[in-house]
Image (cartoon, rainbow, N blue to C red):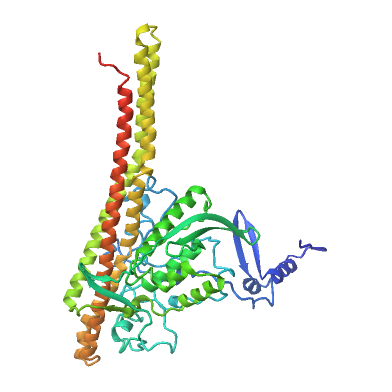
């Protein structure tokens, strides 16, 4: 217990608290405000404390590379961030296509930021990195230098001085002022990375190399925890990989960190859908916790199913660290990784013949055409599904309830006649009315049993599809650079051999795109076959239940 005696002096009390704890915490209307001591020093309240090390925090949104565009994200090959998830049940409240839905939750209709740009934790988030999990000065090199917007690549790290032979000080392409695609395409000799991502040719074309054994990860047992003597609260989830059966615990901010690292490393080649939104208010309501855990489970399952993501060092570290020291070591290593952005293509080795530029461009256009068309189809199904959800949980049950009440009211009227020979009819009418009330309840509950899973699947794919404009933009940027190389050859700025190297490396990018699309199609066929089958099975069972109830009601009315 801290006690103060004598005359109250706010400045001295602030100084005493600052020296005791390093920073001041104030609780106001349920929100936590943290004032760093070095800020106090600047305003004159506290002197000599500005040397306190700043706490680590997530990068602000102002440090994110963003792309602006028109109303059609496919024109500039840019789109808003994928997959915001608002509320615990968004299907019946925000129909797709309405003016109210045109927010950041709609990948294609909102104001267009970078389609895969990491947005950081939500405003007002009290889950910032703290001393339990981070170093005071966490290195985030990729925020120092992002790739050109024209190139369409995901944010990548800036190589540290003297650490790589792949840096190109000369910018030979006007209009591309930042390193990125040019660094990958024009490097005389790419450094041999330790990690290799093989691409093989299968029955359906180029494909990733799939490991012999696969695994999933079970997200379960959400628990509320507190720290700082109850000033901060959080939800912690238990993750259990099926290949080790050894559990680790993670908070939402750790998932957020993993998403960020996967996006930075693989986002130029592989669609990394964003996590379900972090809700600041009402975060500990049971329904919200259940919904977010379900969506985190879906996200983790997607990552486990990807042969490149699931085998990556950062993902394995996330699931298999044994103690805090191992976690911190792996975290620092992942944040200093230089094979990020388009440089991830330097790790790929296609076991296939070289492609010519025309074929590369045709395949890129085909992917763009399909993913845009699928996005339109997914949005249409989401719109129809949301409207149907609203109808099933609102007007339709009420109509059945009205029918039920009307039949029971009619039975009450008939029973008041005093006629002795209509008891059976009145009882039958009453039961028929109750049957329709039961049907109303069935109708209201049914969307949770079938439509919910169809909508969740479509929402996941909407998040995936929101990543493709950026990926395709990177490929188109590379193709354009190869086309521009003819002028550079003509002016002897590069050699014909340099151009061939560029074509070969763009071919590697094309093989990676084809391999990813084969993985995407394989999962798409499996997912939609499974979810539509489940939907139809539940619909059959639903209508059979209603039919059986109606038959029972019918049996009370004899044939006369």
Image coords of residue 98 (percent x, y): 33, 49
Say left or right for 15 vs 394: right
**Residue at point 64%, 57% (across, down):** 230
**Residue at point 42%, 73% (across, down):** 313
Residue situated furthest right in the rendering: 6
Could you say which is closer to the camera, residue 35 or residue 11?
35
- Tell me: residue 435, above or below residue 154: above
Quadrant in which the C terminus is drawn: top left
Quadrant in which the N terminus is drawn: bottom right
Image coords of residue 102 (percent x, y): 36, 54
- Tell me: residue 370, above or below residue 138: above
Say left or right for 62 vs 193: right
- Tell me: residue 538, above or below residue 368: above
Image coords of residue 425 (percent x, y): 34, 15
Residue situated furthest bottom in the rendering: 492
Say left or right for 415 vs 187: right
Image coords of residue 125 (percent x, y): 53, 61
For the image, the number of numbered tags is 0
**Residue 182 seen:** yes
**Residue 75 seen:** no
Looking at the rendering, which quadrant does residue 71 occupy? bottom left
Say left or right for 510 vs 467: left
Could you say which is closer to the camera, residue 99 or residue 486?
486
Could you say which is closer to the camera, residue 281 or residue 222?
222
């Amino acid at each position: 217990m801290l006690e103060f005696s004598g005359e109250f002096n706010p400045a001295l009390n602030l100084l005493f608290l600052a020296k005791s704890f390093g920073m001041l915490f104030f609780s106001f209307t349920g929100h936590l405000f943290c004032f760093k001591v070095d800020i106090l020093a600047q305003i004159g309240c506290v002197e000599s404390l500005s040397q306190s090390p700043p706490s680590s925090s997530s990068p602000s949104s102002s440090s994110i590379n963003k792309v602006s565009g028109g109303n059609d994200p496919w024109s500039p090959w840019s789109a808003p961030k994928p997959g915001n998830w608002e509320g615990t049940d968004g299907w019946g409240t925000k129909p797709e296509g309405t003016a109210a839905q045109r927010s950041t939750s709609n990948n294609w209709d909102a104001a267009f930021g970078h389609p895969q740009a990491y947005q950081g934790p939500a405003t007002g988030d009290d889950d910032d990195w703290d001393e339990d999990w981070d170093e005071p000065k966490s290195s985030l090199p990729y925020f120092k230098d992002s790739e050109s917007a024209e190139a369409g690549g995901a944010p990548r790290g800036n190589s540290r001085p003297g650490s790589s032979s792949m840096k190109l000080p000369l910018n030979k392409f006007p209009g591309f002022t930042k390193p990125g695609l040019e660094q990958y395409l024009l490097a005389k000799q790419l450094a041999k990375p330790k990690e290799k991502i093989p691409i093989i040719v299968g029955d359906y074309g180029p494909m990733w190399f799939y490991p012999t054994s696969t695994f999933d990860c079970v997200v379960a047992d959400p628990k509320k925890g507190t720290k700082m003597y109850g000033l901060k609260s959080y939800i912690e989830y238990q993750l259990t990989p099926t290949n080790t059966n050894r559990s680790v615990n993670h908070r939402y901010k750790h998932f957020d960190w993993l998403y960020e690292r996967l996006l930075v490393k693989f986002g130029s080649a592989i669609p990394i859908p964003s996590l379900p939104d972090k809700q600041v208010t009402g975060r500990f309501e049971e329904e919200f916790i259940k919904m977010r855990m379900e969506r985190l489970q879906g996200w983790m399952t997607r990552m486990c199913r990807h042969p490149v993501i699931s085998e990556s060092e950062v993902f394995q570290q996330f699931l298999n660290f044994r103690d805090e020291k191992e976690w911190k070591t792996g975290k620092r290593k992942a944040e200093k990784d230089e094979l990020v952005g388009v440089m991830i293509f330097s790790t790929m080795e296609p076991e296939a013949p070289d492609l010519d530029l025309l074929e590369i461009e045709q395949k890129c256009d085909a992917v763009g055409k399909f993913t845009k068309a699928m996005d339109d189809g997914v949005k249409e199904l989401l719109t129809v599904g949301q409207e149907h959800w609203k109808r099933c949980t609102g007007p339709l049950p009420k109509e059945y309830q009205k029918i039920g009440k009307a039949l029971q009211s009619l039975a009450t009227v008939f029973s008041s006649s005093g006629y002795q020979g209509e008891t059976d009819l009145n009882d039958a009418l009453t039961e028929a009315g109750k049957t329709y009330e039961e049907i109303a309840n069935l109708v209201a509950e049914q969307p949770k049993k079938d439509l919910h899973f169809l909508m969740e699947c479509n929402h996941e794919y909407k998040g995936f599809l929101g990543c493709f404009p950026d990926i395709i933009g990177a490929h188109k940027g590379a193709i354009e650079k190869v086309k521009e190389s003819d002028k550079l050859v003509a002016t002897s700025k590069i050699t014909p051999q340099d151009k061939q190297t560029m074509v070969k490396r763009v071919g590697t990018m094309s093989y990676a795109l084809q391999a990813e699309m084969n993985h995407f199609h394989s999962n798409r066929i499996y997912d939609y076959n499974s979810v539509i089958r489940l939907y139809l099975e539940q619909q059959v069972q639903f209508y059979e239940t209603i039919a059986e109830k109606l038959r029972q009601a019918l049996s009370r009315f004899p044939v006369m």
